[in-house]
Image (cartoon, grey):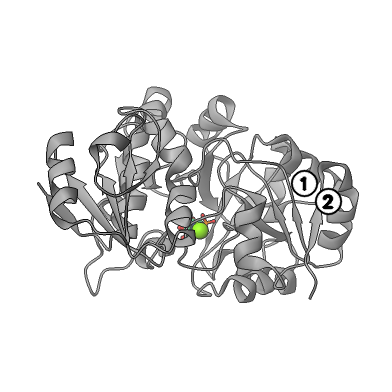
Amino acid sequence: MKTLMLGADQIETAAQILRSGGLVAMPTETVYGLAADALNGAAVAAIFRAKGRPMDNPLIVHIAALDQISGLVREFPPAARRLAEVFWPGPLTMILPRSAAVPAEVSAGLDTVAIRFPSHPLAQKLIAVSCPLAAPSANLSGSPSPTTAAHVMADMNGRIDAVLDGGECAVGLESTVITLAQGTPRILRPGGVTAEQIRSVIGETVIDRAVTQPLGKDETAASPGMKYKHYAPRAEVLLLDGDDSAFEAYIRASGDDKSAALCYNGEESRLSCLCIPIGDKEDDNAYAHNLFSALRKADELGCSRVFAHCPKQEGMGLAVYNRVIRAAGFHIIKL
Ligand code: AMP
Ligand code: MG
């Protein structure tokens, strides 16, 4: 299959592919998504094949108008409405009771469905001229999510019909996933909307243990995606928890010419290995924005090991932490 690279003026071509059951990677403000018509079970099944995604890991349905939600869910509870008013369009996914119109493939057989209203103008236009779109991140399963059209091509060239190029994604990490389907609202994956922001709107909100901890052998994941290996480059990721001088000393002692450090701006001169800057120290939005492209860069440069700073578990830092501990196989090196 030849994968077309489409520009912003070719949305109608992308929409036609989607209407006829094909797959198009689309830009969103979080990461690139691999989209198919959410109500076409066969098209949705093709997403899983193209990514090599386990069939039990459900997808997010993307909408571009609030009234599209009524065809997708059985209930839209008051707390979900309040979150939608404040954070949609934007990087927040809500899990709600699934309507029978949503094919089982989308939800991997669960009784719930994940819904998001993205803010990226191209994603909105594409949905508006086609239909609600089921879309996971447009990477091969397990590898870092793509934040540019070139990243999508690196993983998906020849496996999907087209990529709609919308430039670099603003947030750089996937959406926050929260379930409102039963009991106290629970964050299953931290992302562009922080737990603190959510609590300021709906009050008590729990953070699922699997956000920061590996699942036990017989534990069931509230969000099936959490049980899989994720976000990992080919290089080994070493997550270092300590102050900057300990970070430098660790790299001096154990770095080599196949190592790279994801470093803060200005730190390059103090580190004795290849440096890939991830933004200013304390700027967790920058770390989020640059993390996945930095991990891909380390692979492009042929590195076998990547040293990374351990972020704080608050605000956007929690979303970065959730991704890097998975990239590092849940192994943190305390300095
Ligand atoms: P991705 O689109 O690749 O960023 O992954 C979507 C995430 O949302 C995965 O972690 C899924 O397991 C999770 N997810 C999607 N639908 C549901 C659902 N109905 N219930 C729980 N988690 C879900
Ligand atoms: Mg993904």
Kind of residue at disc 2: Ser
Q: Which residue is mark 2?
A: 130
In the displayed structure, 281 sits above or below 92; it is: above
Q: Nearer the viewer, residue 93 or 111?
A: 93
- Residue 156 at x, y = what percent? 65, 67
Does the rendering let one see residue 323?
yes
Residue under the point 19% across and 48% down? 240
Q: Are marks 1 and 2 in contact (CB under 8 Å)?
A: yes
Residue 309 shown left or right of residue 13 in the figure: left
Q: CA distance from mark 1 to mark 2?
A: 5 Å
Say what secondary structure mark 2 lies in. Answer: loop
Q: Which residue is mark 1?
A: 127
In the displayed structure, 219 sits above or below 118; it is: below
In the displayed structure, 7 sits above or below 121; it is: below
Q: Nearer the viewer, residue 254 or 218?
A: 254
Placement of the N terminus among the 4 image quadrants: bottom right
Kind of residue at disc 1: Ile
- Residue 54 at x, y = what percent? 50, 74
Q: Nearer the viewer, residue 216 or 24?
A: 24
Residue 252 shown left or right of residue 191 in the figure: left
Residue under the point 73% across and 47% down? 165
Q: Is mark 1 within 8 Å of ligand 1?
A: no
- Residue 50 at x, y = what percent? 64, 73
Residue density around tag 2, few if under 14, some if 14–19, many if 20 or more, within 10 Å: some
Residue under the point 53% across and 44% down? 93
Residue density around tag 1, few if under 14, some if 14–19, many if 20 or more, within 10 Å: many
Say what secondary structure mark 1 lies in. Answer: helix
Does the rendering let one see residue 181?
no
